[in-house]
Structures are given as C-alpha cells and as structure tokens.
Image: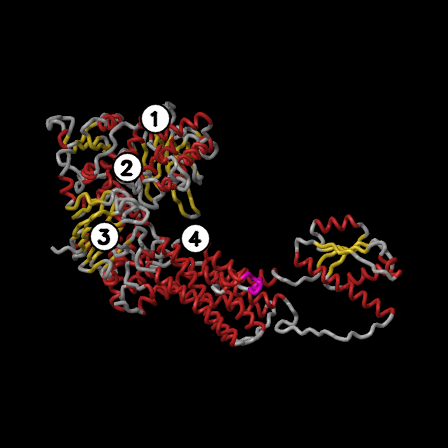
Amino acid sequence: MENAIEISGVSKTFPGMDKPALNAINAGIQPGVITGLVGPDGAGKTTLIRLIAGLLLPSLGHISVRGLDTVKDANKLHDILGYMPQKFGLYEDLTVMENLDLYAKLHGFGGKEKEAAFESMLRFTSLKPFIHRLAGNLSGGMKQKLGLACSLLSRPQVLLLDEPSVGVDPLSRRELWKMVQELVKEGMCVVWSTAYLDEADKCHQVLLLNEGKLLFHGPPKDLTNRVRGRVFLMDAAPGAHRKLLSELISRPGIVDGVIQGKKIRIVCAPSQCPEPQDPEWQVTEPRFEDAFVDILGGGPKQHSILSQHIVNKTKKNSPIQAIHLTKQFGDFTAASDVSFSVQRGEIFGLLGPNGAGKSTIFKMLCGLLQPTSGKALVSGFDLKTATSKARSRIGYMAQKFSLYSDLSVRENLNFFSGVYGLTGQMRWEQINLMTTIFDLRPYLESNAGALPLGFKQRLALACAVMHNPDVLFLDEPTSGVDPITRREFWNHINGMVEKGVTIMVTTHFMDEAEYCDRISLIYAGQSIATGTPDQLKDAATSEDQPNPTLEDAFITLIERSDEMQEERAQA
Amino acid sequence: MNSFSFQRFFAYLQKEFKQIMRDPSTLLIAFVLPLIMIFLFGYGVSLDADKIKIGIILEDTSTEARSLVNAFLATPYFDGRTGYDRLALEEDLTAGRLRGVVAIPSDFSRNINRGTKATIQVMLDGSETNTAKFVLNYAEGVVANWNLQRGIEKTPLPPPPIKLEPRIWFNPELSSRNVLLPGSVAIIMSLIGTLLTALVVAREWERGTMEAMMSTPIRIREMLLGKLIPYFLLGLGSMSLCVSLSVTLFGVPFRGSYLVLLLATSGFLLASLGQGLLISTLTRNQFVAGQIAIMAGFLPAFILSGFIFEISSMPWPIQAITYLLPPRYFVTILQSAFLAGVIWDLIIPNFLAMLVIASFFFIITARKTVKRLD
C-alpha cells in the first residue's frame, strides 16, 4: 500500500539547543492502520507530530502528507488533516456543541452536512447528553473524546494524536482506543504518540524514538521478538520479592527486572540466559516494554544507595490509618467513609478513574485537606490535632515535582532541608549525602527548571526524603516519565521500603501499580476493592477473561460497581 | 487557495463574541475600568486650588493688622486660621497641616503709621511646588488689594492709564477639569484598547487552542479580523461611556461633532488595538502581555501625550518620541472636540497620523503571525 506520510531525511534543531531534537529521520507511514510514536520524554515525539502537521519547519529534509509538502502546501494540508494537540485544543468557555460548531465551520461544513456530521460524532463519542455543558466542566476522559470529535469532524485523511491518553484513566483510554480503531477501518492514517507502552504493543506499526533518533520502525511484534526467550518470571517468597529483585538486577547479564504481582519479571542479556531446564526460571511471553528497555540499554544495575543511608524504621504501630474518612465540598461528596490501615514497610496504592476522589483521600492523609468527618493518622498522630508532629514524619513528592524551577539545585536542597527543620551539621551532611547518592554534583549550580527530567525527579525525591521520613507520599510520581527513569525511581523506593519506610502512592500506570503490596481501588468517592494486585486480578477472573492484567481487573471491577449501583437504583 | 472565507471568519467571530460574553474579565476591562478611572480623573485630579489651609501669625494686634487678617480670611482661596504662637503654626506647616503661614510682625502698624515700608513674612511648603506658587500668588493678590482699599479710603487714586481685560478662549472658567477630562478619556482609552487585545492572542497560546486553530484551514487574516472586530466594538462602548459621563456628570462642554468623534475614536482604537495584538502575538503569555500593555500603552500615554506635561516644553529627543504615540494625536483631537468644536485643520493630520501607526502595527502583527509554532 502506498504510504500516507513520507518523512525523508528530516532533522530539526531549535535555536539555543546543542543537540538536534530530531536527527535524520526517514520513515513511511501507512494509511488504514494505527502507527504508534513511542519513546522516552524529550525523544522528539511532539516535534515530529508538529512537523507532520506543518506547524514547524524542518531544519533539513522534507515531509509529504498525501503528496502535499508540509511547508509549501500547508493550507491544502490543513484541509485533509485532523490534529489533536496535548491539551486537546478545546475552548473551555464554549459548550460541547459550540466547540463542535466552530470546528465544523472552520472546515467549511454547513447546513445538512454539518447536522449529519454532528449526529454521527455525538453518537460515536456518547457525548449527546452533555452538548450544553461547557467544555471546561467535562471530565478528562470526556474532554479527550470531544477533542477527538473536533479533529474528526472534517473526516480527515490523516489524524495526528499527541499523547491523547496522558493523565486519563484506563477506562477512558480503552474507549478512545476502540473509537480510533473504528476509524482506521475506513482507511484513515492515524499517528498516535504515547508514553504508555501497552498501547504501543497494540499498534500496527511503531516508530521508536530516542534522543531524536529513530531506533526502530516496524510492527511492535518484531521488536518484542528480539527479546523472545529472554524474558522470565521467577517466584519469590512472600515479602521477599523486593530483596530478590534488587539482588537479581545487580547480577551481570540481567538487563531488566520489575515486580509483577508475587513474581519477578526478568530480561536477560542474549548470551547470558539460564539453562532452559532451570525450574526457578519460567520463560514467559515478552512484552513491548521488555524490548523497549532492552533496546535503550536496560534498567538500573545496582541496589539503591539511598536505602543504605535510611535509618531503619522499627516502630510497631501502623504508620497510616484512614478511619471513616469523609470529605464533602458543598453538596458533593468527594470521599465517603473510606477506611484502611497501612502496615510499616508496605507500599499502598490508590487507583481510580479521574475524578473518583483518590486525590482527595490522598490529600487528607498527608494533611493538605481537612476531612469533613473521620480521622487520618500518621505514625499515630492525628493530622487534625498534631499537625506539625505528624507532618515532620511525612515526605511528600507532588505531581510535576513541585520544585522551585528558578532556584538552583543547591538552593532547592537548602530550602527543603530548612523547611523540614534540618539545621547545622545535620543539614550540611544530608545535603552532601543527597548530592552524592543522586549524582547531582555536576548540576548543583544549575536551575532546577533546566534539569533533564530524570534529574528533576531525582532532586524531587531527594528533597522529599532528606529528613528521613517514616512515610512517603507520592502523587503520580512518574507520570510522563519514560520506563528507564521509572525503574530507577522504583529501585530507590524499593530500597527504602526494605528499611521500613511506608509508601503511599497514586498512579495511572498499571505497571507502577504492580509494585504495590496492596491497592485500594477508589471509585465515586468510595473504596470499592482493596487487596494485593494478584487478589484484584483474581477477583476479575472470569470465563471470558481467564488471565486478566491489572488493567483488565481495574476496568472489570469498576464496571461491576456500576452494575451494582444500577441494580440498587432499580430496586 | 488563499481566499478569504466568510464562513470561517463568521464562525471565528461568533466564537470570540461568546467568549467575551462569558468572560467577566473582558467586560471588567471594557466597562468597569473606564468607570473607575473617569471617576478618579473627574473627582481626584484637579490642578485648581481653592480653600488652601494657611495659618496667620498675629504678632501685632493693631487695627491695621486686623484689617489685613480679615482680607486674608475673606478670600475664597484660603481657609485661614489665626494664632499668636509662631512656633505652633510653624510646626503645623512642617507637619503638612498647613500649606503656608503668613506672619504679621510686631512693628507692622508702627511702620505703616510712620509711612515707612512695612513687611510681612510668607512661609511656604516648597515640597508642594504648585500649591506653594498658588499661596504666594494669592497672598500677593490679597496684599495688593488691601493696599488699594486703604488708598481709596484715604486719598482717591487717579484711574490707571491702561486697563488689562483678559479674555480666555475655549475654557472661560479656566477650570482644569474641562481640559483634564477630555485628555484623560484618551489616556483611559489607550489603556483599555491595548489591554483588551493584549490578552486575547496570548490566552489562546496558553490554553493550547492556538495550536489546534493553526492546524485547521483558517487563514491568518480571518483570525486577526475575527479578533479585532469584537474588541473594536467593545472599545467604542467604553468610549461612549467615558464621553457621556464627562458631559453629563462632570459638565464638561462638548462643542464638536459626534460623527467626527466616532471617526477619530475609530482611528485611535485601530492603533491601540493593533498595538495590543502585536504585544500579544509576540509574548504568547498573558501575564507578560498584560505588563507590557500597561508599560507601553498607559505610561507613555500618561506622560508623553501632552495630557499633563506640555509637549512643547520637553527636550527635543523626547518630543520626537511623542510623535510615535497615538494618544498624542487623540488627546489633541479630543480636547478640541470638547472645548473648541470641529477644526478640520487639526483633526485631519492627527487622524491620518493615527491611521499610519495603526497600519504599522497591523502589518507587523500579520507578518509575525504565521501558521506555525516557530
């Protein structure tokens, strides 16, 4: 089949940057399939999409879309192009209908034709009940659907989606995926950029970018097959899985290792695989992520140095307790009667769709929100009455790292150590230690805002753990971060947990949820299921779904809760 | 291919109107801001002085001295307070409770009766230059008047050979408000005009909608025109508000033609909306755009438009800069429209100058807005 998009020798250099954002890319993209654009942060995914959309000029080379040059024929190109940028491109102060109307008219639709297009789009996206709602008041998943609808109104031949699923829960993500699959059946060319590697696995073709270079182009299976026979699962004794993992990854010949429920998933280097008969090592079906980490050079290779400097936590009491936590905002109940207790040295995850209330619960537990009723205890201290005592036991790492981007790394460390009450010799020692552990020395004088993403994350973690907290709160800690950096991060976390630090985490990444000892699934302000990842998977196992992933479990449990709600309403 | 599509243009225009109606900040800038400012200028700023507080020290209590004191107390310009304690009144002057102190020394009546020259002392607060000058002038006037009166009482003077009869054109009451308000309308409008559009393009960049717009078939000129027209109409609204308040509430005379005023306002709005659009296009950031709009729109208008400071008394390099500022031309047109009537010789060159500046801004904006991100 003839390619819909031809990329020939394209490089892009932005002024003031020493390395090109894209370096000599050659690729052809087919119509009628979904082509995934994957790679770590800053790999050049957005730059490539904007180049294809004619929104950036290539420094070298050229791109043609359906025979139209993206520079010379930009106007014609925009007639056949649908593009959804990262923020969806919606006018938040216009209603759903008004947004659709605007985009339809800009594409030259009117009258009957327009009405028909609206009708099919609204049915397609099931947004019909919401047409008079302001786009700004829609949930993340609905915004994403509306954004897609707006870019589809003109029946484009080429559809470009820039990270359409970032910050969107698995449920909405899966719906979007189904919608786009409908479209490619009709011959549309779809480019889908993503940080979720399970999505890449489902694409027909994949372009894998790293540091502006195209590392791989082809069906994801071809990449996955490169590690076939090198991926193993190992059973670990209960409670010993983290120790085993950190021991395994420091062995030579091991490329990657992650926790998967009770088991440990290992990728070995080509010539270093164990004997096939070894009963401890069970060969398993490779995933795209295994191959991705392999091609990028593997995950962290040694035990976290950070954990060696963490003081052992030996207190007996349970560090985090939620007792009938309820939070109301006016008439709206954001969290209703949530209770659980987290054990020392446990990783506890809060999962749930956007707007389900997990951030509300999370904020009540770390003292950022006062509960309407109920109690939140940290290390036995009530966050309502002994706020500062409780807080001195807490380390908090917010979404997007909340560093001061115009302060230098040294100044950030100084500031946060001061905030957490470290003084004198102790402060100096801790700052020095963090600098060594996280390799921050070369960056000490640079502004935090200018750091590469991985280093930003290290610095944020350093700031959160400097005062030796009992409990660490992580709010979507690796959102938008590539798998390599995420592994490094979890390596540190695992090491700290070994020392008895307790972790509370919210996340949208299912592989991150696999690191949790226990998960509470939050939906509509309530905890609808709590258990180990494997227990949740078991709960969702059925005849149609004999071997569910954690994402399958997530979706099944939520759908089940919806059905129960309906039955109760009918009764 | 590069054709102008009315359907796209109207769609964009409609969107822009809806956003304006739903965004309180735009309406605030267009209608509440001018209201506040016209009240500030109308009530707060005045270059006239009356009822200035002064103190009079009486070290002489003779009839002559008392009669001079009465002369000071009788003028409407002074709010006088007499006292015998020099130190207390001087302290009030230092503390700013009095703007001037007149001291009548103990040898005052003796000198007068002896026929020698009698002196009185006037102490002024030099930190308020304008007021100090007023006090001095008025005090001299009071004394001259008093001298005259005394002369008439004693021996009639011969009539003066020349009598000066001043006639003041355009503003016979010499009320500074009549000059200040039309000027301040120009200042208010340059702030509003620049601020209105400075935020709109930057907002679309910040919210990510610009990127989406650029991938649609819309053309740059459809977009720019769609941005300009709604804010042009809003600007006309603010202008009507300012003018009607000046005339009805503050009683400033309007002697010109409303049609000419509309024409001049249109020219001015094009220039200052164009300036705002350019700022917005270049900064792509609402906060920075807002700051620059105030710096570039309001400050030069206030200082360099001839509104408060006479342009002809500025050094020539500064005078040269004033030619680049649309408010300079607008202040002139407005002051004449209010106080003098329609003077074509004045209106036409000033109007043309504003159009030239407006087209300059639009050409640069259109050049700088390409349907690309870099």
In the visual, does B329 lie left or right of A363?
right
The chain containing the residue under callout 3 comes to: A
Residue contact between numbered discs 3 and 4, judged by CB atoms under 8 Å? no
Residue type highlighted by circle 3: Leu
Identify which residue, B314 or B259, lies in the foreground: B314
Q: Which residue is mark 3?
A: A60
- Is residue A358 at least partly visible in the picture? no
Q: Main secondary structure of the magenta part?
A: loop
Q: CA distance from mark 1 to mark 3?
A: 54 Å
Q: Which residue is mark 4?
A: B288
In the visual, does A471 lie left or right of B258?
left
Q: Is residue B308 magenta?
A: yes
Residue contact between numbered discs 1 and 3, judged by CB atoms under 8 Å? no
User: Dividing the picture into quarters, in which one does residue A99 lie?
Assistant: bottom left
Residue contact between numbered discs 4 and 1, judged by CB atoms under 8 Å? no
Residue B288, above or below A265: below
Q: Which residue is mark 1?
A: A500
Looking at the image, tell me whether mark 1 or mark 3 is earlier in sequence order: 3
Pick out the residue farthest to the right. Answer: B114
Q: Which residues are magenta?
A: B307-315
Q: Quadrant of the N terminus of chain B?
A: bottom left
Q: CA distance from mark 3 to mark 2?
A: 31 Å
Q: CA distance from mark 1 to mark 2?
A: 23 Å
- Is residue A35 at least partly visible in the picture? yes
Q: CA distance from mark 4 to mark 2?
A: 34 Å
The answer to whether dots 3 and 4 both sit on one chain is: no
Residue A291, above or below A85: above
The answer to whether dots 4 and 1 both sit on one chain is: no
The answer to whether dots 1 and 3 both sit on one chain is: yes
Residue type highlighted by circle 1: Gly
